[in-house]
Every structure is written in C-alpha cells, then in structure tokens.
Image: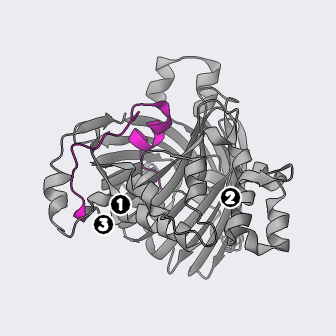
Amino acid sequence: MNSIKKILVTVFIVFAACSSVFAADDIVFEGIDHAMYSNALSAPYTKTSARIMAMGGAGLAVFNNQDSLYINPASLGARGLVFNMPNVAVTLYNVKGIYDTGIVTSAIEDPSIFTDPEKLSSTLLGSDGKPGILSALSGYGRNKLATVDAGVGFKLGRFALAVDTQVNLNTYTDTGNSIADIQIIPQVDAALTAGIGLRFFRDSAINFDIGVSAALQIRAFMESISAQDALDMIPAEGSESDPMAILNAKPVAIGWAVPLTVGANVNFPFGFTLAAVASNIQLVNGGYNYMITNIEGLTGDPMSIVSDVFESDAFTAKSDMNLSLGFGWSPDLGGWEWLADPTVAFDVVDVIGLFDDISLNSFLTRVKVGAELQLFKFLELRGGLNSGYASVGLGINLFNLIHLEASYYWNEFGENLGDRDVDALTIRLNILWER
C-alpha cells in the first residue's frame, strides 16, 4: 500500500513541483494524439460541484457562492461571504458496476483486501470466478476511475479567489474484450482563479449582472499505464523490484493555459433569471501549451518552469470556447426562505455545437435540468436530468461552518446518448464560513 501512495504522490509532484521540471527533447510520448488522451489533452478544467451535478449539471442562472467562479462569474454580483479552508470532493465512477462485483461486502468482511498485495491483485483482477474492480471498466472507449478535488478560496462581496487542484484517473479501452486492454491515464490539474461580478440597477425591478473570471492552469498527464503495469507496481512479498521503475520510464506531458469565462445575467421580478456564459476562452494560443518530459526530469532548480514550461513551444492542444444559456428560478418568499427555499434550473450547454449538428440527439445531449429544495437552511434535497440521465443529491449545512454534500449521477462518455453511460458518486466537504 505504501507503494501505491508513492505512485499517487509522485504523480502529484509532477504538477505541484513543476517548477523543478525541465524539458527533455529526446523523450517521445507515443500516441499522444490517440483518442484515449483527448480528455486529458484539451478538455477544459472543471471543478467538481456536488450541487450542480446533483441538479443534472444545470445551474448557470442560479447563485452558486464561490463556485460561481467556474460556473458563471456574473453570479458573483450577488452579495455573499465565503471562506472555504479547505473544500474537498472525492468522486468514484462505475459505482454500480463495482458494487455488483461484491467488493463492498468483501471489504466490510475483510478490509485487508486493499492492503495485502496478493489480495489487492485479486480485488483488482478478480479470482475464483468472481469479477474484480477492473471488470467494471470493461467496454470500448473512455471511462474514469476516480477524481479528487481539493482547494482553498474565498468570496468577499463581489470578488472571489481560489486555488484548486484536481487528480483524475482516466481510463481507455481499445477493444473492451479483456481487462488487460484497459489503459489508465493519471492526470493532475492545478488552477489559480480570480473573478469579479457587478450588479447594475440593483434596486430596480429588472437588473442585470456581468462578471468575468480568469485562471492560470497547469496540467500534467502521463503516458497510459496498462492494467498489467498497475499490477506490477504492487510489490509481491519479499520482492526487491522497484515499482517506481515503470513510472520513471513513462513520458509526461506538462502544459499550461489561461482561460477566461464571461457571464451575464438578467434578473426579473419573482426570482426569474436568464443567463449567458462564454467559457474556456483561451487567451494564449487557443489552448494548452505542452512540453514533454518524464518524472526523472525533476531537478532542484525552482526557476526552470519559466524557461522550460512557460517558454516551451513543443505543441499546443486546442481547446474550444463554449457558449451556454441558462434559466433559473429562485422565488422570493418574503422572509420564509428559512423554512423552504426552492430553486429550479434549466441549461442548454455548447449552443455553438448545437448549430453544427441540429438533431434531437444533439439537443438532448446539451439539455440540463435540475431543482433544489432547501429546508430550514439545513437540509438540501436535489434532483435533475443530465442529458436525459437522472441525478440525485443531498446536502447538510451545519451553521454555515460545515457543509457536507453527496451526489449520485450519470455521465455520457460516448459520442451519442447511450454509447457509454457511466454512473458516479461525489462526496464534497466545505469547511468554514459559507453564506
């Protein structure tokens, strides 16, 4: 288990200590343009919001506290005070498939299945005719194992600032015929994001907000690790092999980007809001600017990032702008919000892409619908439809000091609805003031 921890720490170091990385021109990243790397290569960084995912992915036109930085910075125009020190979210994918393997029951009966090397191998691969965790990832195309978010930030009035990190374990299977075909792609993101929102004609029946947020993002991802490689990194008892040797030989792509998000809200009487958000407006070369190195390329020079990462012109992965529209309703109940405070949201994301492919499937893929009911400013009940897939969630807010949320939802990883539907469970914890 210590070796596994070392693996995760090493991957984390790739971005956290990227100030000490130097380019290695002779290192070749095989197949970096393959479909398996598409998410890690150019997909926009998105902080995991348990609230939004429980509401079907909708929420452009509703107030989201500090998360408005990433969703719609115009909503920062509503007054608020938030100090999250820290906020942490853990997302596990393929939950139903993993549960159906019986792993959960086995872990309760024998927790050592995750610490004993031999038992861990059996847990991953399966044994005695019982499927393992990796069997839940079978099937052609993209998938995910887990995502971990951690960050600190605050919202003071109309201004917000946050520092976030995110670790993704992406997977890809070329054929889906065998567990041995599964490829794991570790990915790490770090983001420094600042934003401001302004409300105009605040005392008028109809007012509007505008907002902007900008981020400096650093992303690192490793050449894919096969399922067998992952197993080889679990040391057998008495073995003198070095599990890190496999990772040391893997090329790593390290890139940076400066995306901008611009939002606008029009607020009507009775709590109705219309929103438009242009996100992922890449300010430098239209995407992520990458260089190739490896873990052994770590040095002790803290200034090398300036000359190697930010001045590298190895290649750029284009990342397209996204224009989305939202409708929200948060009625003014005349002071009774402490008893019951409802919210309804309806979004159509990537409107530009919709005009490129005008079809029912294209439209349904882009529609997000959700609702929330907050009771006694303590209990939050949520539900929604994300591209036709159901989502549910629950939140508990203790005195605005501890906010615990859980969401269960589905994502579509395929080209069309139904191609690659993957369920996910997110648990998020915010600590300190949130109002």
For image coordinates 15% across by 58% down, the residue present is 306
Mark 3 or mark 2, which has the lower sequence index? 3
Q: Are marks 3 and 1 in contact (CB under 8 Å)?
A: yes
Disc marking residue 17:
3
Q: Is residue 153 magenta?
A: no
The amino acid marked with disc number 2 is Ser
Closer-to-camera residue (114/91) = 114
Disc 1 to disc 2, C-alpha distance: 30 Å
Instruction: Sort mark 1 into few (<14), some (14-19) or many (20+) by Cα contacts within 10 Å.
Output: many
Tag 2 residue = 407
Instruction: Sort mark 3 into few (<14), some (14-19) or many (20+) by Cα contacts within 10 Å.
Output: some
Instruction: Sort mark 2 into few (<14), some (14-19) or many (20+) by Cα contacts within 10 Å.
Output: many
* Callout 3 secondary element: loop
- Specify the segment rendered in magenta: 20-47
Q: Is residue 37 visible?
A: yes
Tag 1 residue = 14
Q: Quadrant of residue 358?
A: top right
The amino acid marked with disc number 3 is Ala
Q: Nearer the observer, disc 3 or disc 2? A: 3
Whole-percent x and y of residue 248? 38, 57
Closer-to-camera residue (78/33) = 33
Q: Viewed as shown, does residue 278 lie left or right of 267?
A: left
Q: Is residue 146 visible?
A: no
* Callout 1 secondary element: helix
Disc 3 to disc 2, C-alpha distance: 32 Å
* Callout 2 secondary element: strand
For image coordinates 19% across by 59% down, the residue present is 305
Depicted 385 relative to depicted 425: above or below: above
Closer-to-camera residue (44/322) = 44
